Amino acid sequence: MSDNPDDKAPAPTLFWRDPRKRGWLVQAFVLAAVVGLFAFIFDNTLHNLEKRGISTGFGFLQNEAGFGILQTLIDYDETHTFGRTFLVGLLNTLLVSAIGIVIATVLGLVIGVARLSGNWIISRLAGVYIEIFRNIPLLLQILFWYFAMLPLLPHPRQSLAFWESVFLNKRGLYLPGPVTESGFGWVLAALAVAILGVLLLWRWARRRQDGTGRTFPVFWTSAAMLVGLPLLAFGLAGMPLSWDYPALKGFNFRGGITVIPELVALALALAIYTAAYIAEIVRSGIQSVSHGQTEAAYALGLKPGTTLRLVIIPQAMRVIIPQLTSQYLNLTKNSSLAPAIGYPDLVAVFAGTTLNQTGQAVEIIGITMGVYLTISLTISAFMNWYNRRVALVER
Amino acid sequence: MARLSRQQYAPGDHPDWEPPASSVGVLGWLRANLFSSWFNSALTFLGLYIIYLVVVPLLDWAILRADWSGDSREACSSGGACWVFVRIRFEQFMYGLYPSSEYWRINLVAGLMVATMAWLTVPRIPYKRYGVVFALFFFPVITAQLIGGGNFGLSEVETTRWGGLTLTLILAAAGIVAAFPLGILLALGRRSQMPIVRAFSVAYIELWRGVPLITVLFMSSVMLPLFLPEGVNFDKLLRALIGITLFQAAYIAEVVRGGLQAIPQGQYEAADALGLSYWKKMGLVILPQALKMVIPGIVNTFNELFKDTTLVLIIGLLDLLAIIQAALEDPKWLGYSIEGYLFAATVFWIFCFGMSRYSLAIERRLHTGHRR
């Protein structure tokens, strides 16, 4: 410390001129405002609930539901609890999303490739499909399939039959159901062994190629293993599987698997709508790989099929996968439009019927939003992991 | 041929020969695009067959055999489409349950909207900045006054009578206008240096983007009344609008964030070096560039919002789709749902397709060297 009076410390910066201190002040203010808002809402909600005589807490999940549900994947009837109702709704949501995702992916892939076709008519047709279905609200499409197209289907007695085993009519879609007999476990075990074998084969083939440069027909060998082993087990175990075919009894079909018309309409609408988006993603993904890549691969002497498999598709996937995942997520979220046609998904049975019966809006909407939020956060965590893994390593 | 090929030409004297007739003109185009190989030819016939399967019956049903005139279902006897139904209900589909003597107010707003949109979207019209201010601040007030009434000698029309395409447009426009400022603030918050502000912004954006709009609408219709002090009550339309706005803001925030991230770091540093404060830096340097870049993204978000407004059907508002759905249940007109839905689909399609084309066009026009 110097005693020289001329050596004064600079005048202290005014508090609000120091960006760091000002930053903390602003944040304290924001925090106080948000906490205050939540306290205000919390206080009002408690007061309002008390006044209306609505109980709080999650105890209602143990209460008896007292209503039936159109489609249940697990055991359920009126005497089960609201907690069970939630589970039934969640499973129905996952079911329609899974079906929708499979159909949408196949359809979207076909249309995306068709859009890139050298054939003018096919490419234009794909373009027309994309522009029509992408620009019409999904809810309208769901209502259209359910309320306008479904009544055009015939009555059960005049059902549309496919190969005498699949039937389609106003009441739904009837599929033959597999009935497993004892010994079917062997087939599943064989399948597991085949999958393990294929994984080992891949590793071995890659090592060999890295070491010696010689390739091995991995694809055909794996396909043969995956199909052959379970088939062999199936034969040896004495074909332990039969089919339960739906048959017309009285006014309706019995036996097999019954798919309710609500599920058919919802899954179809979701798939058709999302396929238009997926087609665009596939097209842009493939177009994002520059033509120089193809030319370079040809210059190295790769065949067109090999070029597609080893050069184009891996690079296109980098663009396609993240967008595709977010479309899957959109489809899952869009399946919440189910209440419009009465398909018993999570929103319909839980945020709809259960809410009406118990009146516990805060808890129920909270749980419902929480479920969708969990699904989307899980998927976006996966997407971030994938993006990091495939990100271009640039110099 | 042989004679020609043997002929010798001095260098540069070779005459230009016509290309083969099969590679130019209509024939050449057909060969190149439709019949280049047997597989391609098969695809062409498949395509033609699909067109034949879909277009011919549709044209026959929707136009050739359709009934247009008349005023009851008895007029629809030809077996084709019954457009009489749509024609009779047309005013309701457009104006909802609005009193017909007051239709001029909606028409006036529609005219104003078209003019404002033209101002904002046609590149040649100048003073865009004032157009934005007008669209964001004055236009909503004028619209609310005109359609809601209650002042200036206009009779009041309750929101329960608003409906049809009018309501759809009101929901979409109000949603975007209200969500825009909030979305920009959230995007700035997410890019902020302040950890608490950033955390709140991220939490808000991820929360709303992670849930479906329908649960948000349920929330705003059943939970919002619980959140507010006693005696404060919003009507159903306003509650839906609040839900849509909160939801939409998260999506706009993500689009704007994309723009903010695309601005080179040098711009931020240059603004700091000039001694601009945070808000001046953002307002004068960063946001003007970032927002210009994300216009196509915002138009796309708006397109999605426009389609999503149909969800208010589930909470009982009478937008275009809901009013058509209600009309289909009229016992006098049972069985004409295809006509009703096709009409709705056409109206939505025209708006959405127009918007997506506009977004593409502006993307091309704005492609002015931002890409690095």
Image: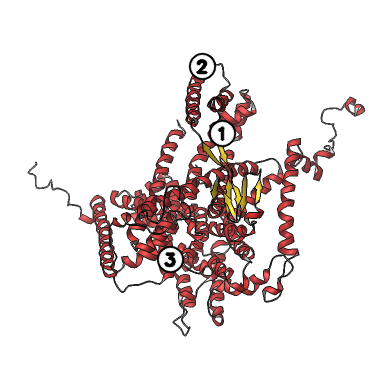
Tag 2 residue: A208
Tell me the residue at 38%/71% (across/down).
Answer: B234
Q: Are marks 1 and 2 on the same chain?
A: yes
| Quarter of the figure with residue A309 | top right
Q: Alpha-carbon neighbours of circle 1 within 10 Å: few (<14), some, or many (≥20)?
A: some
x, y percent for residue A173: 58, 50
Q: Chain of mark 3?
A: B
Are the two marked residues, 1 and 2, in contact with CB atoms closer than 8 angstroms? Answer: no
The amino acid type, in three-letter code, at marker 2 is Arg
Q: Residue furthest top?
A: A212
Residue B52 shown left or right of residue B330 in the figure: right
Q: Label 1 marks which chain's residue?
A: A
Task: Specify the farthest residue to the right.
Answer: B3
Residue A387 percent across, percent down from the top left: 44, 37
Please report the residue visible at 43 percent of the width from the left and 60 percent of the height from the top: B180
Can you tell which mark lies on residue A313?
Answer: 1
Where is residue A82? Give x, y as percent: 36, 55
* Labels 1, 3: one chain: no
Quadrant assignment, res B232: bottom left
Mark 1 vs mark 2, foreground winner is: 2
The label shown at residue A126 is none
Q: Identify residue for label 3.
A: B241
Instruction: Kindly identify the amino acid type of the residue bearing the numbered disc 1.
Output: Ile
Helix, strand or loop under label 1: helix
The answer for how far apart the CA atoms under marks 1 and 2 are is 23 Å
Q: Secondary structure at mark 2?
A: helix
A172 versus B18 height, above or below? below
